[in-house]
Image (tube, rainbow, N blue to C red):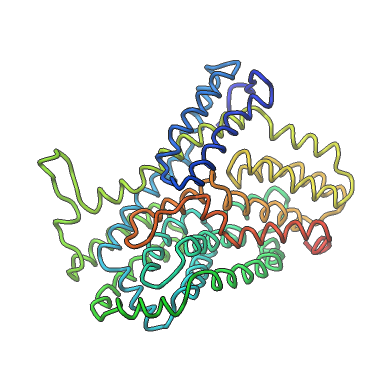
């Protein structure tokens, strides 16, 4: 999306930032007040867009920029994926998949913090294999979160473990968009970047794993609950494990995310009907009294409506902010002031942080400051792998921590409809994402101490 011209606002930069500040304040207020449903964000986003329109000097250009931002391909892809993932999760839950997970966990003696740690590791594997953090959340959260009720897992920590595992792959996977973007902008080989990044990512993951295990719930209570609920009837749902295995296998072979989800839905219906785990009448039926369609498919799609509309409105707001050129001005300032290697790394960290905070998009943030990081870093002989690592690690923190970013909103939305488990807010899930917090500490320490600067 390229706006026709740089947007200017009455009040200058503060005027340009005011709509975003209003939105952020509203999100925090809703999160702290215990009203995490995305529908509560809709009026706040509408108000923020209205304020932006009133402050824009060229309102027509602002309106066109918002529409262009809302219609980005990535937005449409995410929305379609969330709607299909809602259908898949609803079908899986209705088929007894959760009961099957409880049965397996009881046999393995895994519960509470152990189950949260296991969820983190599973999501690490999925995200590293597929390279998509959002896809990992979409696939894993609806399947892993509901079982936490019977396994004694702390709900917030369990969902944060899913989010943390998704963060790990986004940071380390060679097929992740952030890995590709960080390597490409710095002229580094992806293989070299991934190998050099392990020394930062692995320690962070180990610390996060220990925290999820320690704070993820009482193992004793979970074992008792799981044992009471894990009857042999629960084992009937074990064949449904083939469905997520199929989806992951398709993604590993390079198939499109939507292809994996659609085939997963077909497989869930086929296996569920074939084994008597689902009834034809509950998949889809006509409710003549209310003049509408009902069933698991409709319910699944409805689960994704809230976060979909939120995303459309948010990306419009972000597009208006991007078109002001604030990020470009930050980069220009950094170019003038960065002199030593440490200065360049601090300015790289600061500018890519600001870009991530303002745009809420990891890859966009990398692309925004990539040229500055390459030119300034080369001048003071910072290795290309080191520059790529600083960019990637930094953008794998804020979007997975803050309550107004897509990953945290998506993870929180996936807690909807899980029987026996609470509906979570993006604020509490993001704050409990220990992996991203540790990554933030790691990158700051690496810059201040120079750890890893010579070899990347």
Q: Residue 368: x and y, percent?
A: 67, 40
Quadrant of the drawing holding the C terminus: bottom right
Q: In x, y percent, where is residue 241? A: 34, 71
In front here: 352 or 422? 422
Q: In this view, does 371 lie above or below 217?
A: above
Q: Which residue is drawn at 48% across and 48% down?
A: 409
The part of the image, by quadrant, that contains residue 201 is bottom right
* Total marks in image: 0
Image quarter where the N terminus lies is top right
Residue 192 % position (x, y): 70, 63
Find residue 367 and report its horizontal and vertical position in percent.
66, 43
Looking at the picture, tell me which residue is in the foreground, 320 or 242: 320
Along the viewing direction, whichever of 59 and 418 lies nearer the viewer: 418
Seen from this angle, which residue lies furthest left? 288
In this view, which residue lies farthest toward the right? 340
- Please state if 174 lies on the left or on the right of 378 as rendered: left
């Amino acid at each position: 999306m390229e706006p026709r011209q740089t947007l200017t606002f009455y009040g200058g930069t503060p005027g340009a930032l005011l709509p975003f500040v209003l939105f952020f304040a509203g999100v925090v207020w809703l999160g702290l007040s215990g009203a995490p449903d995305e529908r509560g964000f809709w009026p706040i986003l509408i108000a923020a867009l209205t304020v932006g329109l009133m402050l824009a000097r060229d309102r027509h250009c602002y309106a066109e920029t918002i529409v262009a931002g809302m219609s980005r391909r990535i937005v449409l892809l995410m929305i379609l994926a969330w709607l299909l993932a809602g259908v898949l999760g609803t079908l899986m839950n209705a088929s007894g998949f959760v009961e099957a997970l409880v049965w397996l966990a009881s046999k393995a003696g895994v519960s509470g913090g152990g189950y949260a740690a296991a969820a983190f590791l599973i999501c690490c594997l999925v995200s590293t294999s597929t390279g998509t953090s959002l896809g990992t959340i979409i696939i894993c959260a609806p399947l892993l979160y509901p079982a936490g009720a019977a396994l004694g897992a702390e709900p917030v920590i369990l969902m944060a473990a899913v989010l943390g595992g998704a963060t790990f792959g986004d940071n380390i996977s060679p097929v992740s968009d952030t890995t590709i973007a960080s390597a490409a902008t710095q002229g580094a080989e992806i293989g070299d970047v991934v190998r050099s990044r392990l020394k930062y990512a692995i320690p962070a993951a180990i610390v996060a794993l220990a925290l999820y295990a320690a704070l993820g719930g009482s193992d004793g209570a979970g074992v008792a609950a799981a044992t009471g609920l894990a009857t042999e009837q629960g084992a009937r749902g074990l064949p449904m494990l083939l469905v997520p295995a199929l989806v992951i296998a398709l993604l590993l072979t390079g198939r499109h995310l939507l292809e994996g989800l659609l085939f997963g839905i077909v497989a869930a219906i086929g296996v569920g009907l074939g084994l008597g785990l689902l009834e034809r009448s509950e998949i889809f039926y006509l409710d003549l009294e209310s003049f509408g369609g009902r069933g698991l498919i409709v319910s699944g799609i409805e689960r994704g409506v809230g976060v979909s509309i939120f995303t459309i409105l948010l990306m419009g707001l972000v597009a208006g902010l991007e078109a002001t050129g604030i990020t470009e001005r930050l980069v220009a300032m950094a170019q003038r002031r960065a002199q030593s290697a440490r200065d360049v790394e601090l300015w790289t960290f600061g500018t890519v942080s600001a870009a991530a905070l303002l745009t809420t998009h990891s890859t966009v943030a990398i692309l925004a400051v990539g040229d500055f990081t390459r030119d300034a870093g080369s001048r003071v002989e910072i290795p290309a792998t080191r520059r790529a690592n600083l960019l990637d690690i930094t953008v794998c923190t804020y979007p997975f921590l803050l309550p107004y970013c897509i990953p945290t909103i998506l993870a929180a939305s996936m807690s909807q409809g899980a029987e026996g488990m609470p509906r979570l807010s993006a604020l509490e899930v993001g704050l409990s994402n220990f992996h991203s917090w540790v990554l933030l500490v790691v990158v700051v320490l690496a810059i201040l101490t120079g750890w890893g600067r010579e070899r990347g």
